[in-house]
Amino acid sequence: MVRNSKTRCIGILTSGGDCPGLNAAVRAIAKTVIKAYGIRVIGILDGFRGLVENRTVHLENKDVSGILTLGGTILGTSRDKPHKMPMGGKTIDMSDVAVANAKNLHIDCLVCLGGGGTQKNAYRLHKQGGINVLTLPKTIDNDVYGTDVSFGYDTGLQIATEAIDRLHTTATSHHRIIVCEVMGHSAGWLALGAGLAGGADVILIPELPYDLNIVAEYLLERRRSGRRFSIVALAEGAESQEDIKSRQKKKIKKKRSSVNTRIKSISSLKDLDKIDDDQNGTLVVREIQGEERTYHLVQEPKASRVARQLQELTGTEARVTSLGHVQRGGVPSAFDRLLCTRLGAKTGELLAEGVYNVMVAYRGGVCVPVPLEDVAGKRNTVPANHPMIEAARLVGTCLGV
């Protein structure tokens, strides 16, 4: 029996990076609104770009059957923002077009699945164009504000943990330091969780600027006590105290904003001494074009730099493993499938009730609507007093501070 609903038609899109569970969430939303409430569903392709370009598909129950365990997103995704849309070689504010297309589709609510950027973009469209929006929190970084957990995090955590498990065997065999870089630009949930679950000896996260000398001394002490290998779990956004001081110094002195700036043609590497740069973690790359030789300064990958510096400080051979996009691919975990199904079902209930302009969050074991204005522009980071931080310290894990 189809129940009464205040919503007649919705548009649904997935935005930002792909993530395990997107299809599970799309499936749960579509099945709930179609079967229980008779709501029409329009799938918008490739995120907000698809809304601007008016590329859509009509979704029926059969279209979302069998996608619960499928990774990625059947709708496609992009990182394009309506107010900063690359169009014909220029960046243009296409917000008015996005709003107009949403209204022309006769949708009562635009449902957006994505991370922190998606929450902001959806809220901006609501404020600028007056359209109704509703969002779901997606990201393996787990940094969406207002929810206990975002879907995708559990799957990413399992993948990163398994990688650290596997690195133990090769690190042990060769008596090496292995730096495992995991995702997390501004939040260290993934590195912290995987590091604890995988038994990493050192965990470095963005919220706790580290001192590499403390890390090196910890690794030397491990070696003196007979442990011939060490695993370092490094969040990609982690920074050393020295990095932060150097960046602040550059701002004060108004130095160049990036070491990726092309350097003028020079005759020898000796001339690099004349370049006003702190040389912190840079590599010199030479290009030969006919008779001309040109040099560049290129930022060395952070994990590579950390491994190199630890090798110099400890005298122990170091290697790097960067998990990259492997962490966001593949089949979602059982927890993420359950979470997406519950979030999607709750979304259907809220749409039927006419509850809009909220994010459907997972709090205290239940799915609840949170005003989008309380979420947009904020980030969920690891508190310094979080129980996982305390647990890491108690079991002897080095956090670099």
Image (cartoon, helix red, strand yellow):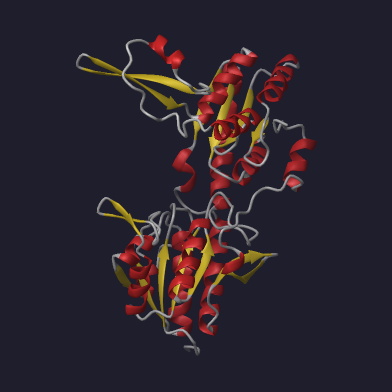
Whole-percent x and y of residue 221? 74, 18
Whole-percent x and y of residue 135? 51, 67
Q: Is residue 211 left or right of residue 82?
A: right
Frontmost residue, 166 versus 362: 362
How many marks the image carries: the answer is: 0
Q: Is residue 64 left or right of residue 280?
A: left
Residue drawn at x 47%, y 39% as measured from the top left? 324
Tell me if residue 326 comes above or below residue 146 in the rendering: above
Image quarter of residue 166: top right
Tell me if residue 110 comes above or below residue 202 in the rendering: below
Whole-percent x and y of residue 30? 43, 73
Residue drawn at x 49%, y 87% as measured from the top left? 5
Q: Residue furthest left?
A: 290
Frontmost residue, 162 versus 95: 95
Image quarter of residue 248: top right
Residue drawn at x 47%, y 72% as measured from the top left? 126
Residue drawn at x 36%, y 58% as measured from the top left? 76
Looking at the rendered image, the quarter that the C terminus falls into is: top right
Camera sees residue 68: no
Q: Residue furthest right?
A: 394
Camera sees residue 384: yes
Frontmost residue, 43 versus 96: 96
Q: Residue furthest front?
A: 253
Tell me if residue 387 comes above or below residue 145 in the rendering: above
